[in-house]
Amino acid sequence: MSKYKEIKGFKVQTLASDTAASAIDAGTWSSGGSLNVARRNLGGAGTQTAGLAFGGEATPGNTADTEEYNGSSWAEGGDMGTTRKQLQGCGTQTAGLAFGGATPSLTGATEEYNGSSWTAGGSLSTARKIMGPAGTQTAGLAFGGETPSPTTNVTEEYDGSSWTAGGNLNTARQDLGGAGTQTAGLAFGGSTVPPVTGVTEKYNGTAWTEVSDLNTSRYAVRGAGTQTAALAFGGSPGPTETESWDGTSWSTVAELATPVMLGAGAGAQDAALAFGDSPISGVTQEFSAPSDFTKINLGQVYYNSGSNAFKVTAQPVAGGTWASAPNINTARYVVSGFAGTETANLIFGGNVPPGNNPKNATESWDGSTWTSVNNLNTTRRALAGFGTNTAAIGAGGYSTGARSEVESWDGTNWTEVNESNTSLEDGGGAGTQTAGLRTGGQAPYSSSAETFDGTNWANSTAMNAAHANHGCFGTQTAAVVAGGQPPSGTPALVEVWDGTSWTEVAELNTARLYGTGVAGISTDGILYGGDTPSATANTESWNGSTWTEINNLGTARGAGGGGGTSTAAIYSGGDVSPYQQTELWTTSVSNTTITVS
């Protein structure tokens, strides 16, 4: 009999603490020395062992107090020249920069700190409060904030004496977090009055580019670190929530010990400082990442001696979440996808709103950016798609009627290949470019199925019921068809294909008439979105026998393009304005206690 070590490559170990993906994931928050002047809406700068706190709202009224942190306690520094709250800052303890805020009227006042006293600098061109900060005393960055508008997307750069205009944020907002430098800044979260947002943007010294959103949308969020290694913490909702940024995506790490709503942040990703709070508080907290930790391994079983429990490292689908990602370039719905993965996807065709406007546009996704590539040869919507983002098939669809044309994608160009046996729109697709499956469709509604070997189409065993606008995922010999718009029956109907025959199995929890997104294989998949007929955000996971409701999409919609796996999926476009949204489904590797019933 095989041993556990022979299967997984490691023994069942006894560990003092849980395994972690990185030092940041193993990091924790602990209490530091309290501020001498309790306050909120203050400015912050410096590092964890040389921090700077200034201004803010104290009791009673606003304050100009400055305090310096040495890693354990705060000491009084020189007072600011302008008493104010809701300001921001950057720089170091001996070369700090304070800007903006409310006196209580909006101000653009800027001051420079030399380690003992403040000196007036050039004022912001746009007076504002609760903006995002980044940079140093001689190369500062201020972005967004609250103005009478009430929000702004204005960015300004400081050169040590004056502020000049930079590139505007893509999303105007206030009370956002910031990190990084003047030429490599990071903006995240905030309020667009309303709603709260998780939008993240990076700055290259000239322009802002939208990247992956925070997992938890919030305002009054504070930050520390750089453009490629940042920490976001506190805010509302989720005043203890902490997320780590690796330059590509956000992941949830250890929560703050004490909620932070309107405090300040400083430091680095692996050594951050949070201080002040609402209600008015002097609480200081330090985030520290260990130098040594045990690396997490998917599938590992170990004994945690600290919690006296056996644990397993798994990737539970139920723990997954959806997060916004950059928009597709061409607004559309009834778009074809299921070609590729969460980090390498392809969408093609679709309908451009309003009205009946089929499109031949194709876009490729590399995990962070959508790029427009060569178009389909035949303009149409509602194709059946399958394969990868470098080797895909688009079959059937609709332009002036149902189509039988098939095109093959080689990563650069579309080429017309042999037509399918039946002209259909709104069909489903699964498998690869050389071993594909096309299911159902309409005009009229159909239960037909065809297989594709890379050259020819062959009629296969028909489904038990007609399906159109349905979800289809898996392979040529093991697939699932779920929901859809049959002329009779139920839009919750699910059938499983074993390569020979179709079998009706457990129905969906939420019946969907059309437009579902899907990802995965026949024994491990997810289905999301769609129309009931109203748009739904519901997501369900499939384990081969039952459907389970899991975390919803951020935006309810149908008729988007899907793809990926049960633990890493994508949904792009759709039938809800602005028709360009992309969301990513991510399931984290995590440690779970093993229970014995």
Image (spheres, rainbow, N blue to C red):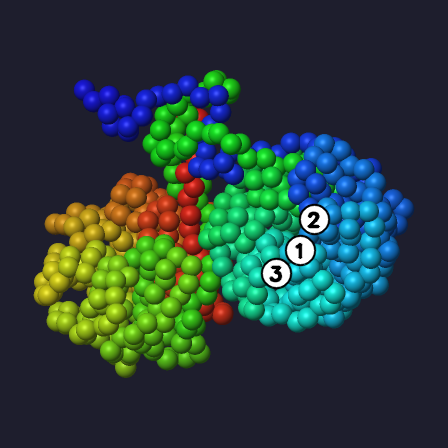
Tell me the CA gap for discs 2 and 3. 15 Å
| Residue placed most toward the observer, 210 or 71 | 71
Q: Is residue 378 visible?
A: yes
Label 2 or label 3, whichever comes before in sequence order = 2
Pointer 3 with pointer 1, Cβ within 8 A: yes
Residue for point 56% across, 51% down: 226
Give the percent coordinates (x, y) of residue 543.
Answer: 31, 41
Tell me the CA gap for discs 3 and 1. 8 Å
Q: Amino acid at mark 1?
A: Thr
Residue marked by disc 1: 136
Label 2, residues with CA under 10 Å away: few <14, some 14-19, many ≥20? many
Residue for point 34% across, 77% down: 359
Pointer 2 with pointer 1, Cβ within 8 A: yes
Label 2 or label 1, whichever comes before in sequence order = 2
Residue marked by disc 2: 92
From the viewer's perspective, is 403 left or right of 232? left
The N terminus lies in quadrant:
top left
Query: Is 535 above or below relative to 245?
Result: below
Where disc 1 sits, the SS reads loop
Label 3, residues with CA under 10 Å away: few <14, some 14-19, many ≥20? many
Give the percent coordinates (x, y) of residue 37.
Answer: 83, 40
Pointer 2 with pointer 3, Cβ within 8 A: no
Residue for point 83% across, 44% down: 77
Q: Is residue 447 visible?
A: no
Could you say which quadrant of the image residue 464 lies in?
A: bottom left
Q: Amino acid at mark 3?
A: Gln
Residue marked by disc 3: 182
Q: Amino acid at mark 2?
A: Thr
Query: Is 219 above or below relative to 270?
Result: below
